[in-house]
């Protein structure tokens, strides 16, 4: 890679640091999962780090992020959820952001303006429209960014959200993280060449970009957010990335061509490519990168310790935060 760096040194270091934070946190998650410490399913983000870090760097803290797709952990990290709370949620412990009720797919944190994922893919876009409408009604210039995978774009709810955002000209940035796969279904089987073309029928401006290039994502999302903040309405961005891990840990990927995966690992690893690029440009030295990695590794170990020490929820907690009033007598207080 011989591209110049197109952001200032401070931003370049920030982007690299955020991508490394995702990568190191997830390597530890994978190891803890394989040791049987983390229950349930985990879906990891390898290949999406640049899309997540570039998106968040373009946002302000008071902008909403309504997350979607299955590549979620990196999105929680870049939106500033404390690593301990994410890890404890993965462990199903009370120290998690959702007190262990949510697990890996359902971290949310309202005071960080992170709107969590529901059980069905493609369900975060209408809430994002509602959040943007609420911000507009309150008279702020905060925007709502929302992510979705290629698979999720097949749901009607996604298209409904586009229609409402266009109709009300709302400050929403729709990011489609197209990693080529919805579990084992290739995104090539979807009708448009560029998934951002789904914005065309409702006249929303669209962009289709290389989402494994963190700076491209940062510039494109910044432009869309600036337009939304200035009253220019929504944008649909297709962020083309590669899925560099299986759909979930344990998926044998028998449907996937080995050569395609090897080529993607060689060419589309956002962290490896950006590390080379900033080193080549003289923005950081090898020893500075090693220091950044040491610091993150310590943070991640602290997160694991926090999760391990955090208690399991009491069985009765299964009835908390579910229904406003207990259902069929369950969980009633004596
Ligand atoms: C409405 C709905 N259909 C099916 C599923 C099962 N499911 C979970 S993840 C997934 C694939 C998602 O693919 P994509 O949207 O491309 O996101 P990615 O996994 O690539 O991040 C599916 C089909 C679901 N959760 N919700």
Image (cartoon, rainbow, N blue to C red):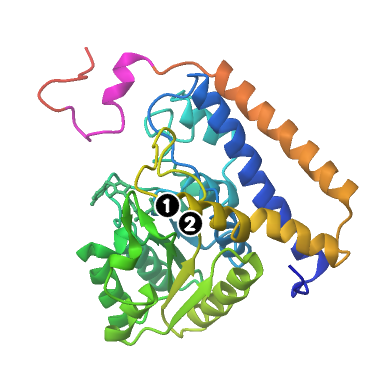
Q: Would residue 61 be found to the left or right of residue 126 on screen? A: right
Query: Which image quarter: residue 102?
Result: top left
Give x and y (percent) for residue 157.
23, 63
Residue position for label 2: 260
- Disc 1 residue crowd, few under 14, some 14–19, many 20+, Cα 10 Å: few
Q: Which residues are magenta?
A: 314-326
Q: Position of residue 183 (x, y in %)?
A: 34, 49
Q: Is residue 64 left or right of residue 148?
A: right
Mark 1–mark 2 CB contact (< 8 Å): yes
Whether disc 2's CB lies below 8 Å from ligand 1 is answered no
- Mark 1 vs ligand 1: CB below 8 Å: no
* Image height of 39 relative to 136, above or below: above
Magenta stretch: residue 259 in it? Answer: no
Circle number at residue 257: 1
Residue lying furthest front? 259
Disc 1 secondary structure class: loop
Tell me which residue sits at (55%, 52%) in the image: 262
Q: Is residue 319 magenta?
A: yes
Which quarter of the figure is the C terminus placed in? top left
């Amino acid at each position: 890679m011989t591209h110049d760096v197109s952001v200032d040194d401070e931003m370049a270091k920030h982007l690299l640091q955020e991508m490394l934070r995702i990568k190191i946190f997830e390597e530890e998650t994978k190891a803890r999962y394989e040791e049987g410490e983390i229950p349930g399913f985990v879906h990891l983000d390898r290949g999406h780090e640049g899309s997540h870090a570039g998106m968040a760097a373009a946002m302000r803290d008071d902008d909403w992020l309504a997350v979607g797709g299955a590549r979620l952990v990196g999105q929680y990290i870049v939106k500033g959820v404390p690593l301990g709370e994410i890890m404890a949620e993965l462990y199903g412990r009370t120290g998690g952001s959702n007190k262990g009720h949510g697990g890996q797919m359902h971290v949310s944190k309202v005071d960080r303006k992170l709107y969590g994922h529901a059980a069905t893919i493609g369900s975060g876009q209408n809430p994002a429209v509602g959040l943007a409408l609420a911000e507009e009604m309150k008279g702020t210039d905060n925007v709502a960014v929302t992510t979705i995978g290629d698979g999720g774009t097949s749901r009607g709810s996604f298209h409904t959200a586009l229609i409402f955002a266009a109709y009300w000209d709302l400050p929403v940035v729709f990011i489609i993280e197209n990693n080529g796969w919805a579990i084992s279904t290739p995104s090539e089987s979807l009708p448009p060449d560029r998934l951002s073309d789904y914005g065309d029928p409702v006249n929303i401006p669209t962009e289709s970009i290389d989402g494994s290039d963190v700076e491209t994502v940062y510039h494109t999302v910044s432009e869309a957010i600036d337009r939304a903040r200035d009253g220019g309405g929504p944008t649909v961005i297709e962020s083309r990335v590669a899925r560099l891990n299986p759909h979930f840990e344990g998926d044998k990927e028998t449907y996937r061509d080995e050569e395609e995966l090897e080529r993607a690992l060689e060419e589309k690893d956002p962290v490896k490519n950006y590390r080379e690029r900033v080193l080549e440009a003289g923005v950081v030295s090898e020893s500075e990168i090693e220091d950044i990695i040491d610091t993150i590794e310590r943070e991640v170990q602290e997160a694991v310790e926090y999760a391990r020490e955090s208690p399991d929820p009491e069985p009765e907690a299964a009835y908390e935060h579910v229904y406003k009033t207990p259902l069929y007598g369950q969980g009633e207080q004596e």
